[in-house]
């Protein structure tokens, strides 16, 4: 079964302290505190932008494993962010794990007062 956009959004929002925002018209993101941990785009483009590593070298492992379905995110890619296409060669469980890892990396950088309990 292919992971659907609404299921991915629900998965993101189930994280402690997560909330939905639409900072740019038609582009949905999931935030924790005041920071984005997942760029969900729109339902028409089933993909998710997540922090895939502490730096570009770590995130490049995704590009090597999934050259057709992982790409460097515009503007913030140098910081380890990739776009992962949903419904392609990347297994749904790996996409969920990438969301989990992105969430954890973003929470770790939040000031203690903004971290979910």
Image (cartoon, rainbow, N blue to C red):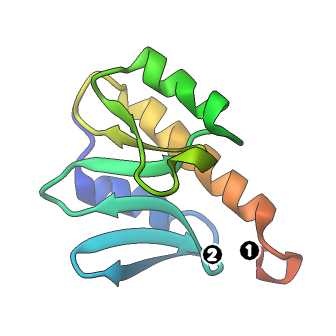
Q: Where is residue 3 in the image (x, y as percent from the top left)?
A: 27, 42
Residue 103 numbered tag: none
**Residue at 41% across, 60% down:** 39
Q: How would you rate the neighbour count of disc 2 (Cα within 10 Å): few for under 14, some for 14-19, many for 20 or more? A: some
> Is 70 on the left-hand or right-hand side of 106?
left
Residue 17 numbered tag: 2
**Residue at 78% across, 63% down:** 109
Examine the image and state in which quarter residue 36 appears. Answer: bottom right
For marks 2 and 1 on the same chain, the one whose residue lies earlier in the sequence: 2
Q: Position of residue 112 (x, y in %)?
A: 87, 76
Query: Which residue is situated farthest in the top direction here?
Result: 65
Which image quadrant: the C terminus?
Answer: bottom right
- Which residue is disc 1 drawn over? 116
**Residue at 43% across, 37% down:** 95
Which image quadrant: the N terminus?
Answer: top left
Local SS, label 2: loop
Q: Where is residue 12 in the image (x, y as percent from the top left)?
A: 47, 60
Asked whether disc 2 touches disc 1, contact meaning CB atoms under 8 Å apart, the reply is yes
Q: In this view, does 21 lie above or below 71?
A: below
């Amino acid at each position: 079964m292919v992971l659907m956009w609404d299921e991915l959004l629900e998965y993101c929002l189930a994280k402690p302290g997560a909330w939905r925002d639409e900072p740019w018209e038609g582009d949905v993101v999931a935030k924790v505190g005041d920071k984005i941990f997942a760029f969900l785009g729109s339902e028409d483009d089933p993909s998710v932008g997540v922090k895939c590593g502490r730096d570009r070298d770590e995130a490049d492992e995704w590009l090597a494993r999934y050259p057709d379905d992982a790409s460097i995110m515009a503007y913030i890619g140098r910081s380890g962010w990739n776009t992962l296409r949903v419904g392609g060669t990347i297994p749904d469980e790996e996409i969920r794990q990438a969301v989990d890892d992105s969430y954890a990396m973003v929470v770790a950088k939040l000031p203690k007062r903004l971290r979910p309990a």
